[in-house]
Amino acid sequence: MKAPPAPSAPDAVRIPACRPRSRRARWTLAWKAAAVAALLLFTLFPTYWMISSAFDGRATGGAQSLFPAEPTLENFSYVLSEAGFGTFLRNSAIVAVSTVVLSGILALFAAVAVARFRFRFRTGILMLILIIQMVPLEALVIPLFIQVRDLQLLNSFLGLIIVYVAFSLPFAIWMLRGFVAAVPVELEEAAYIDGASWGRMFWSVLLPLVAPGLVATSVFAFIIAWNEFIFALTFMDSPATYTVAVGLQQFFGENSNEWGYVMAGSTLITLPVMIFFILVQRRLSGGLVSGAVKG
Amino acid sequence: MTTPTKAGAARPAPRAATGPTPPQRRGPGRLRLSTARPWLLLAPALAVLAVLLLWPLARVLLISFQDYGLREIVSGRSNYIGFANYAEVFADPALWTVVLPNTVGFAVAAVGGTVILGTLVALLLASLDRVWRTIVSSAVMVAWAMPAVTGTYVWIWIFDADRGIVNQFLQGVGLLDEPHNWFTDRWSFYAVVLVNIIHHGFPFVAITVLAGLLGVSKEMLEAATVDGAGAVRRFFSITFPTLRPVFAVVVILSTIWDFKVFAQIYLQPGGSGSNRSVFNLGVWSYVESFAQNRYGFGSAIAVLLTVLLLAISVVYVRTLFKEEK
């Protein structure tokens, strides 16, 4: 055991007091360490296994061990070149980015309306947005399929994009409302005193201050559009328009599954989401909580 | 999330007492613009929601009263048959023996599992020092960020009948003589789904409850310790009552999510229609509609699912708004 560095007097007094750990405290510590280890294993193993199999040359053919037996990039190159996964990635990116832009604009306007103005039916609209968020989208597959089919938008990105915009809107409005409400009203009033019109105030004062919230909701909309499965499965029936979530299915053959390829594809899908997610997770959970309660 | 911020902010404002509007509100035109502005801002979002969520919601109800097949889809004609689809749904023994037990039983197990594990993880995180808390919560985030589709494939691969690591491990230890197919039996099929859903769902609970835990009064906990209360007693007497609203939100949201699980079931071997004993409401509706082209019948099931979920949502909204008072 190293001696504590004792930078200040109170610390020096306190640390020795904790030193002779009781038997009970030691048990607690051991229990905690075991819990942490189990938790890390449970949370990280699937991701590890996915990546490890993706790099394993034998995951598709033969036995698989805990570590890649023959580390290789072959799965990735096959998936990207011959299996057309590049196209799926591009399709998903087009759909997701369009969804982000459209839903960001619409949600910001709506959030300003409900956060900054008091008008009749405001509570009604808030309730509507909250309730609509609970509608099981899975239950809307049939009517939306028919609607999109009537508009001849099956197999087109536009059909998916408008549907995803609708899905991400309620939550985006709900969350952005919290961010808009957090901007002090005094700043807006100052802008008016300086002679700014409402539009000028919106672009020069409100928008820059809400930008972090906009980033967080954009990431959320991106993840929705990137991960969505059931509508992409229903609307798209040619490999040229598959998104990544649907494209993965084609590695499932009649008799055997090409696990190395599936995992390589899964890794390619998961990485952007994980990066985005970790970038904004604080804001996301904070916004979820505050947005859910603020009036 | 414990303290309601602005008192009465949710109450309908008396008339058009607008917040910050430009100060020049003299002429009648000005006045009208400031009343119309919120509606102008809301219009595009409301239009999208109306066309793509509300109208389809009404439409699924209309279709559920029709014999709606390929012919009707192509011609666009309606073909009302009253409550026949509902009669068929409720008369189908599969609803009572397979679909509802799968849906409700699974939701109960999954909500219980995610909330209990999430709470335990939150308590664990709260008791860790900074470094370890960062490490563990990052790992939790990784589990959260895994997309449902890829996560499902990874779990299928882990439990794969031929070369899955679980089968290999169990054979290596000697618990299994030959590879076991986990996806044919209804119980083990749903056990895999359960692991998948808990893995994907507990991070939300853990992070939300952890945020709430930080608001629990330390003085009260210390006082209780001095009075000799153990950790379990402290949790149920102080922490849980303080966090009751957080738990209400977390439980209801998880219930909604776990009721309508789709991709995690549909993608598992047999889940897309060949194994009818694993259907839940969502998958049943989808398979009847898109594999059998019985869109009317599928819609009736979808309506049933929606009604169940809206009932839960009403409870959710009431909990939230009660909390604000």
Image: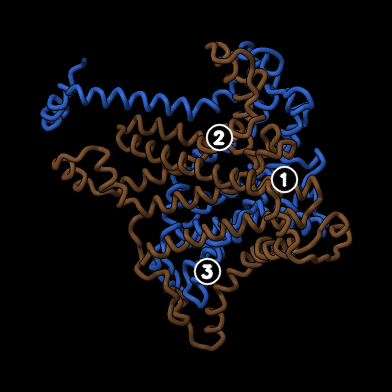
Q: Which-is-in-front pick, marks 3 and 2?
A: 2
Can you tell which mark lies on residue B196? 2
Q: Amino acid at mark 1?
A: Ala
- Residues at discs 2 and 1 both on one chain: no
Q: Residues within 10 Å of mark 3 (few under 14, many from 20)?
A: many
Q: Which residue is mark 3?
A: A113
Res. A235 in view: yes
* Residues at marks 2 and 1 touching, judged by CB atoms closer than 8 Å: no
Report the chain shown in brown: B
**Which residue: 47% across, 36% down?**
B141
Q: Colour of chain A?
A: blue
Q: Name the subunit of mark 2.
A: B
Give the structural element (helix, strand or loop) at label 2: helix
Which disc, if any, is residue B292?
none
State the residue at coordinates (44%, 72%). A194
Q: Is residue B187 above or below residue B322?
A: above
Specify the quadrant of the image occupied by residue A19: top left
Read off the chain for label 3: A
Res A232 label: 1
> Residue at left 74%, top 32%?
A85
Left or right of residue A248, residue B18 in this image: left
Q: Quick one: SS at disc 1?
A: helix
Three-letter amino acid code at disc 2?
Answer: Asn
Residue A226 visible in this rendered orientation of the protein: no
Q: Secondary structure at mark 3?
A: helix
Place of residue A243 in the rendered image (x, y in percent of width and height, measured from the top left)? 72, 41
| Nearer to us: label 3 or label 1 | 1
What colour scheme governs how the chains and residues are painted in the rendered image of this protein?
Answer: by chain
Q: Earlier in the sequence, mark 3 or mark 1?
A: 3
